[in-house]
Image: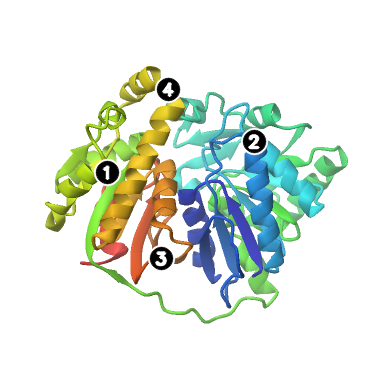
Amino acid sequence: MLLGAVADDFTGASDLANTLAKGGMATTQFVGIGAGDAPAGCEAGVVALKTRSIAPQEAVRQSLEAARWLLRQGCRQIVFKYCSTFDSTPQGNIGPVAEALLDELGAEVAVVCPAFPTTGRRLFMGHLFVGDRLLNESGMENHPLNPMTDADIRRWLRHQTKGEVGHVPLHVVRGGAEAVGATFEVERSAGRRLVVADATSDEDLLVLGRAIAGHRLVTGGSGIAIGLPTNFREEGLLSPDAEPLPRARGLGVVLCGSCSRASQAQVRAYLERAPGLAIDPAELVARRMTAELAADWVCRRADALPIVYSTSEPSGVTTAQERFGREEIAGTIERFFGELARSLADSGYRRIVVGGGETSGAVVEALGVKSMRIGPEIDPGVPALVADRNGPLGLALKSGNFGASDFFEKALRQVGLP
């Protein structure tokens, strides 16, 4: 294994794995911290954790354990993957994990770049934009777990770290990899170990990729990785051959726990062509709705490729959180979708499309799969995945804000056959 990645959630892991696979690296996504060795021929390994919204100390522990496993597989470079909307709070764990990885690797500096221009995430003057809106005006300010109320990534990161945060402005990036490298050296010499780098296009990310070819640690969204496979290819380290991907075949279902604007539009679009079961959090808490009841509902509509969703407007999320507590309601919804996915998979469902990062993590953990191979891209940042669970199991794990309005319909086609 040449490149290893530690991802703070499951959809982010598949997003990064998709980027590396498109770049020509034989890529495997691992669920949690690996116990044995990676399969032969694996050039890039992405360890999917569920650390995005947990306490920094525990996030650091899990991330270091994952990084150490990747290093034992022979990795030359480690990527710490977080969301392209930098999901965290002022007390969040992105900064602590990045600093701990720097220490573990003996590295002196690392890039910080959540930019993913293909999906509208751009960094300019250290500020993160989603489309034409500042991050804190994009809907992310209403995120139920990690509300982003400041678009200045330097300032947000400073809340979480011990030291000052550096910056590579866009005009330096446009000056080429050598200019970027010189700026990293200036920031390193000044003691600024984490350096936010502007990027508004894929070309900017490719420049950054060349500049950080020798860095032991890279941090960012999946976009920062688009140039990394080229570095290994130019060293003659990548194999030209790829093993064919098995295809899943069987019943399909959509499960969506995300409340993002994109997910709301996707649910509305999918309901125009398939039946849907809306999940009220209060019904889950009261046990009037259970995974068993939902599975029965789905199975009675199997041929219609139904959707089960807890997606709602921000006001509905706020009401549920105020009534039951943020942690309680989030855990209840995640457990429900995990139990539902496991029940459906046990009943013969071989194509499962999931919307939402936390929901995806709960589903994958409940299914008990340990690794997933990377298939074709469905929409930017979201690949089809194939796991082995008594035969091929087709999955799509979509971050809440990713995907076109027809994503769910396309995803069911791409993850396998009826």
Q: What residue is shown with label 4?
A: 325
Q: Earlier in the sequence, mark 4 or mark 1?
A: 1
Residue 56 got which mark? 2
Tag 3: residue type?
Ala
Distance (Cα) linking label 3 and label 1: 22 Å
SS type, badge 1: helix
Q: What residue is shown with label 3?
A: 387
Extreme-bottom residue of the structure: 241
Q: Are marks 2 and 4 in contact (CB under 8 Å)?
A: no
Q: Quadrant of the N terminus?
A: bottom right
Tag 2: residue type?
Pro
Q: Position of residue 182 (x, y in %)?
A: 81, 49
Q: Are marks 2 and 1 in contact (CB under 8 Å)?
A: no
Q: Nearer the viewer, residue 59 or 141?
A: 59
Tag 1: residue type?
Ala
Can residue 31 be seen in this snapshot?
yes
SS type, badge 4: loop
Q: Earlier in the sequence, mark 2 or mark 4?
A: 2
Q: Dot 3, how many residues are within 10 Å of its Cα: few (below 14), some (14-19), or many (20+)?
A: many
**Above or below for 146 versus 240:** above
Depth-wise, is mark 3 or mark 4 nearer the camera?
A: 4
- Is 370 left or right of 406, judged from the image as shown? right
Distance (Cα) linking label 2 and label 4: 21 Å
Residue 291 got which mark? 1
Q: Residue at x 52, y 66 (%)?
A: 28
Residue 150 got which mark? none
Q: Earlier in the sequence, mark 3 or mark 4?
A: 4
Q: Are marks 3 and 1 in contact (CB under 8 Å)?
A: no
Q: Dot 2, how many residues are within 10 Å of its Cα: few (below 14), some (14-19), or many (20+)?
A: some
Q: Residue at x 68, y 47 (%)?
A: 173
Q: Residue at x 42, y 46 (%)?
A: 362
